[in-house]
Every structure is written in C-alpha cells, then in structure tokens.
Image (tube, rainbow, N blue to C red):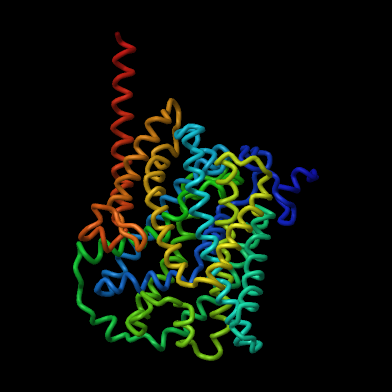
Amino acid sequence: MLTPADNEFSSPWAIESVGLEPISHLHRHGGARHLFWVWFAGNLSFAYLVIGAVVWSYGLSLWQSVLAVATGVAAFWAIGYLGLPGRRTGLPTMAYSARYFGRRGNRLMALVSWVNLLGWETVVLIIASYAVATILHRGFGTPMSAPWLVLSLALSALLELSIAFFGHALIEAFQQWISYVFGLLTLLVLLAFVPHIAWHAVLSKPAGPWLSGVVPAITIVIAVSALSWVTTASDYTRYMPSSISNTRLVRAAAWGAVIPTGTMMLAGVLFSNSAPTLASAINPIQLLLHWMPVWAAIPYLLVTAVGIIAGGIMCAYSSGLSLLAAGVTIPRSRTIGVDAVVSLGASLYVLLVAQHFLASFEAFLSLIACLLAPWAAVALMNVMDVRHKSSVRGMTAWAVGAGISLATTATPIFTGPFAVGIFRVSSLGYIAGFFVTLIIYWLVGRGAGRFKLLTTNM
C-alpha cells in the first residue's frame, strides 16, 4: 500500500517537494523507456529544421550533410553518459557537480546553467506564442495584435510552467503522451513537405569543402542540440531504479534525443533547396507555413507550439534545480515562480516592444555556451569516480577552457580576438574550449597523482 510520501514520488498530480537531496532507492520508479520518451518529446522541435538548412547552406552535398547531422547529434550519447550519476546517487546534475567543483565553484556553475536554461525557456515561450497566435488567427480570425499575442503567451506559459511546477512525475507522464500523439502528427506534417522537395537538385549537388564546410556544420549541430542540455542529464535519471543497467540508461536518453533531432534536421536539409531563405529567416515558422497545404496548416502550427513547449518544460524544471544549486533557499516548486517573472517579462519585451532583440538574446545564449562546453569536459571526466577530487583543479581547467572558447567564438554581440577564419563561421570555439579543458584537467590530475605518490614514498 502506497503511503502519502510514496504517492508524491509516483503520482503525476502530486507536487514534487524534493529539491537537491538524493532520491532514496525506496522511491525510485519507471524504466528506460520512460527516459526515452522524456528526451524524445523534449527535442520534438521544428526549430531543428532551420539547423538542417544551415548545414545545407555550407555548400555540402546530400551525403556530406547527412554525415554532418549524424556526427553532430551523436553528441547526445554524452548526455546519456552524464545521466549515470543521477541513477547512482539520486542527485540532480548541478548538485552532483559540487563534488568536483567545490561548493563555491559549483554555485557559479549552477548560475551559468540557470541563465542558459532560463534563456532557452524564454525563447521557447516567444516562438510558441507566435505559433499559438497564428493558430487563433487562422482558426478563429483573431488579429495578430498585442492583446492576442499576450493571450498566446499566457496560454503557452500556463502549459510550460504549470507542468514544471508539479515536477518530475507529471513531466514524465506528459512527455510520453506528447511523444505518442505529436510524434505521429509531426510525421504527417513532414510528409506534407515531401511534394515540395527538389529531389534532382538535392541529389545532384556536388560535394563541398570539408574543412570550411563539413567541420563547421558538425560544430553548429552540436552547439544547438546536445550542448544546451549538458547540465540537465541527471535531473531525469535520479528517479531511475538501480536495476537499470548503464547501457540501457545511456541508450534510452541518447536515442530518445537523436531520433527526433536528426529527423528534423535531415528534413531541413532536404527542404532547404526549395526554401533558400530558411537558414536566415527571421520568422521561419511563418515562412514554412506558406508551403503547407490547407489541411496541414493547423496541425503544423499545433505541433510547432506543443513540440517546442515540451522542451521548454524540461528547461523550466532543470533551471529550478540549478537555481537551488546556486544557493537560493526556496522550495523547488517556487523556483518556477522566479522563472515566470523573468521569462514572462523578457518575452513581453520581445513580443510587444523590440522583436529584433530576440536575435541579440540568442547571441547572448551563444556566449553562455562558451562556459558550458568546458563544464561538460570536467563533468564527463567525473561521471564514474569523484574520490579525492580537487575543486581548484576543476575550476582552473574550466576557466582556461572557457577563456579559449570565448576568445575563438564570434557572435553578433561579441567576437573573440582569435575568432578568425573557420572559427568565425562555426561553433568550433566550443569544441576547442572543451578539448583544452579536457587535456588540462587530465594533465593536472596526472601530475597531482605523481606528486602524491612521490611524497608518500619519501
């Protein structure tokens, strides 16, 4: 018989009260398939069509584009691997990372994670608001005016933030339902694009450059997909029973994200020859709407709104855990209120005052990614074993890697001094920062181990 405490952990409609404390093995539930659907729904976004178009814009052939997308989305296997500490310890990602960054250092890392997730949560609300407003305009004849945009934002925020407020159990149930229903709708909408694909042009396009084409395309795919999620992996595995093997856990998370992300990007590759402005469109959702047959217009907009909100729900939930790890001492459910104030305020500003500000906001999030890539390098080195770890070692390696990323990254609001050549037209700066951090962290650890061995033998 379930006790009230047990019901909190398994009932979708019970508000999750657990914050950063570990989940007891007595309260674990679910299986690998539940994790699969969480990540599947979280990446069921039509925004990935634009990334496919960006890949195609590098002048690549079809098989080079497929290779770039496949290689880029393979980074989601790192997300699966980063989820293993959650199942082992019951801790969310940003609580576990304190073991190798130290309490003070981890508060900075958690703040970076919170800003990143809150930022993408806001972008999701803006895009979803436009989609909902267009649904109301097409279905009920409402004008695309400020009051209806505000109503659309309210509806989008209500769905996104209320589910995140209830917590893990409702998110798990909702994402599975979204995957079933909207996964099928997404497939139908994608099929509506097929008659517009210029197959001859796509299949006959010659191969493009490898160094200045394929490599930058791969880095951009990584940057806009897996890299955004690195600080969230254990948030969705901490409730998993210990009986689930590491292999099944990693495979479920990775394939759950790879399948929808890869499918959307490949669809963008195929369609971009017919819609050459897709990669640079200010409102790609509206652009693609012109290619939709009448029967597919409303399903397309509905899938666009709900699909991207499913990812926003995960951002809102994980950003709350990051806020707690940053040192804010409020119940987890109330962190959603903090997010609501900030994200709704920013969304209203973009929707009603300065639509062009969204591009600058996304550029700011690109700079935040310069701090996430080095964090991921240290985190991956500490998935299985964190005994005798030095926070100085972790912070030093991270700081150097972050400096390299910033120095080699170009955005509309900031360009690093070494962001030239291939670095200026790609996300290669993130990869450089990642590997520099990885090497420094390994070398410092190896040196510390030798020093300890030497002093022990003296």
Which of the two residues, 248 or 127, is positioned nearer the viewer here?
Answer: 127
Q: In which quadrant of the rendered view does residue 380 lie? A: top left
Can you say whether 453 is above or below 350 in the image? above
Residue at (64% x, 43% y) in the render: 19
Give the position of the N terminus as an image quadrant: top right
Outermost residue, bottom side: 294
Which of the two residues, 352 or 365, is positioned nearer the viewer here?
Answer: 352
Residue at (32% x, 40% y) in the render: 400
Q: Position of residue 133 (x, y in %)?
A: 60, 79
Q: Position of residue 328 (x, y in %)?
A: 61, 41
Residue at (67% x, 57% y) in the render: 170
Can you say whether 23 is above or below 340 in the image? above
Q: Position of residue 306 (x, y in %)?
A: 59, 70
Q: Position of residue 422 (x, y in %)?
A: 22, 60
Give the position of the C terminus as an image quadrant: top left
Q: Is residue 275 left or right of residue 12?
A: left
Which of the two residues, 192 or 370, is positioned nearer the viewer here?
Answer: 370
Q: In which quadrant of the rendered view does residue 440 lie? A: top left
Which of the two residues, 37 or 303, is positioned nearer the viewer here?
Answer: 303
